[in-house]
Image (cartoon, grey):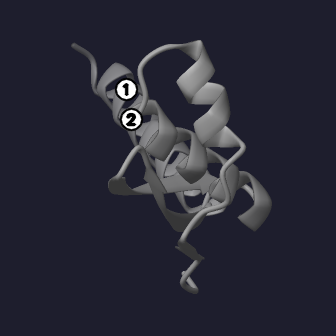
Amino acid sequence: MKPTVLALIAFAIVVFMGAVVWTTVQGAEVECEVCLVFDGQEVCRLGRGPSETEALAAAHQSACGGNTSGMAESIACMNRAPERSSCPAN
């Protein structure tokens, strides 16, 4: 291959890697943990989202997803208030 083609390929790779790093840094999300008790079992799960509210909702949904079977239990779990929740500063 010619040196100019190799240089263009190398430049394209560097630009791509830079874009990946940039979007990763810019897409920093809030991470929260929710712990809830349902059907006698305590489950704690992490959730991420662009805001604290969405991260808490994602964690709550994740905790209920692994702790229920069926739609009725899932709805009952989602309507239950968490025992504790936290969103440590990132």
Q: Amino acid at mark 2?
A: Ile
Does 18 sit above or below residue 89? above
Alpha-carbon distance for marks 2 and 1? 6 Å
Taking 42 as reference, is 69 above or below it? above
Q: Residue at coordinates 66% horizontally, 51% vertically from top-left?
A: 80
Where is residue 30 drawn, in percent x and y?
62, 66
Residue 76 placement, left or right of 54: left
Image coords of residue 74 (percent x, y) = 57, 27
Tell which tag, 2 or 1, sits nearer the viewer. Answer: 2
Q: Are marks 2 and 1 in contact (CB under 8 Å)?
A: yes
Residue that carries the numbered disc 2 in the rendered image? 13
Mark number displayed over residue 9: 1
> Does the rendering let one see residue 15?
no
- Provide residue 9's location: percent of width, then percent of height: 37, 26
Residue for point 35% across, 52% down: 40
Q: Which residue is more in the foreground, 70 or 85?
A: 70
